[in-house]
Image (spheres, coloured by chain):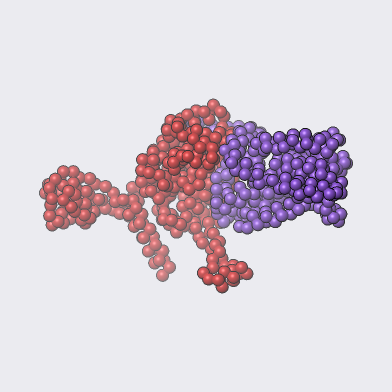
Chain colours: A purple, B red
Amino acid sequence: MSGASLEAHGARREGEPAPARILRAMPSLFRVGFASAIAYRAEFLVWVLATNMPLVMLLLWTAVAREAPVGRFGEAEFVAYFLATLIVRMLTGSWVVWELNFEIRQGTIGMKLLRPIHPLLVYATDNLAALPLRALVSLPVAAIALWWVGHGQLASDPMLWIVAPIAIAGAWAMTFCATSFIGTLGFFWDSSMSLFQLWLGFFFVFSGYIVPLELLPAWLYDVVRWLPFRYLLSFPVEAMLGLVDRDEALVALAIQWAYVAAFLALALWTWKRGLARYSAFGG
Amino acid sequence: MISVKHLVKHYRVHSRPPGLGAAVRSVFRRNYRTVPAVDDISFEIAAGERVGFLGPNGAGKTTTLKMLAGLLHPTSGEAIVAGHRPAARERDFLRSIMLVTGQKQQLLWDLPPAETFELNRAIYDVPRAEFRRTVDELTELLELGPLLGKPTRQLSLGERMKCELAAALLHRPKVLFLDEPTIGLDVTMQAGVRSFIQDYNERHGATVILTSHYMDDVAALCPRVIVIDQGHITYDGALDELVRQIQPEKRVTLRLSAPIARADLDALGGRVLSLDEAQARLQVDVSSLRGIVAQALARLPVADLTVEDPPLEEVLAGLFARSRMAAAAGRE
């Protein structure tokens, strides 16, 4: 190393647009994120086990449906629905709200702010890098589900099978952006986690996590269809199982990605405002 | 490299008296007071300088460092670091600086330091060949070899700090802010970190700003010190000049080959700090140092003699006491 080379690092690829640098960094960010996911395998397994609510609901609703179908849901339909719910939940969960809350309160977020990359992008790649592990857990479940409930319960329209993965990606993006927004409120408000608890409460009821949304009273279903929660979970499940027709699925997809854009804008805006406040008050 | 003009940082702090009544009242009406953490400081630091920020707890050292690193926005005044306004946190600014703190770490806790190095390589966009060279050199200088593959959580405090320093230097920052980098380290490790920082500064001409409670760090590393007390700069200049100004006395230690009487020591002049059978210590004004040393050697059974400055802690305690008295006098 020499004094001259000190300049060389600083001056490297000056003028190059930031996205090109970020793209170049992505493989390493994913690789290190994956290594982290493996290092935290014990916590990961606990998280997987804690995501057992759809299985509990599966047992509950199939018991109910044994007597008589509920709407168009018989036993097999409930099994397929809650297994699909489990898969989507596994693939779209995000713990960024906990990480943000912890790092803001501890002041360790400062170390992330020193790096020339947006911390939310680092959290996002970290989160996505854990996907292969999550898939390892959820894909065998999907295979068992296919074998058990048969093809009859899955969407037959090939268009819906194009929509489903985009809807799952959208559900992840919405979850990440919405929970980033709530976590970022920690810059302003010590009790941002209580808002998250409230969000979680609505999520459980209105996302289709504990009951298929179409079984809600009609007036409530009409409201819930426009709330964000449906697009976090129920919509990808509906697409996978063919519970929506092609036209409705495309409209829902548009609504979902509009929500992604809105929550992203909200998260970035609160981040900017929060950072200004954090920089004024100290961390 | 660093230019600071009339920099001010005031914190607005919520305050309430103790007790249930006050707690209930504070729900409806909160009282705030303004605390001046940094109050109108100005200084210039040239490229390649090593400067120590000294001051008691709460003096404003870390606040100043955080403002220079872009983590805190100043209330008023201006700071320019490596040609950038830190508060704007531009990408090129962040690539030019690094802040290492003994209190918070950037190493990934459950992964080996090598993974954090790779992450930093990607984030700072360091070409692989240069990265390899830098890692090899830092590994050799800091003796990191056996540490790179161990999970960070299994490293000792000193080992972690060495890896923190290496992670911070991979992109070769032009300005290095060090906040208490040797806190909690044992004496050997402190000396190792110090000599590494000096080496890095001398090889690459990086500017180094250091805060430390260990005066040995400052004495070993920083030819120039800026003393901050109660948000003000009370001294900015050479360390040895500070010692001369505040404590114009030297400490003379005599190792004795035979016991002596207290009266013989008193007769030399100066202030006797201690006397036992084997050793005597005197505090002597610089102007009479030569005469006293000559007399001691002529009259007393001296086996060895050393002349030193008083400990830096005492010098600073004197400086802080002096500035507080001046502030109190100003208020009256």
Residue nearest the viewer, comparing A80 with A243: A80
A186 left or right, relative to B6? right
Q: Position of residue A78 (x, y in %)?
A: 80, 44
Quadrant of the frame with the C terminus of chain B? bottom left
Q: For the point 60% across and 43% down, which residue is it? A: A43
Q: For the point 48% across and 48% down, which residue is it? A: B103
- Tag count: 0
In the picture, residue A121 is in which quadrant?
A: top right
Judge whether residue A185 can be spotted in this image: yes
Judge whether residue B51 can be spotted in this image: no
Q: Position of residue B256 (x, y in %)?
A: 16, 47
Residue nearest the viewer, comparing A216 with A70: A70
Residue nearest the viewer, comparing A125 with A211: A211
Residue extending furthest toward the top: B129
Q: For the point 39% across and 60% down, which residue is it? A: B323
In the picture, residue B16 is in which quadrant?
A: bottom right
Q: For the point 76% across and 44% down, which residue is it? A: A82
Residue extending furthest toward the front: A67
Residue nearest the viewer, comparing B17 with B8: B17
Q: Position of residue B229 (x, y in %)?
A: 43, 57
Q: Position of residue B186 (x, y in %)?
A: 38, 44
Q: Is residue B199 above or below residue B308?
A: above
A231 left or right, relative to B276? right
B254 left or right, relative to A129? left
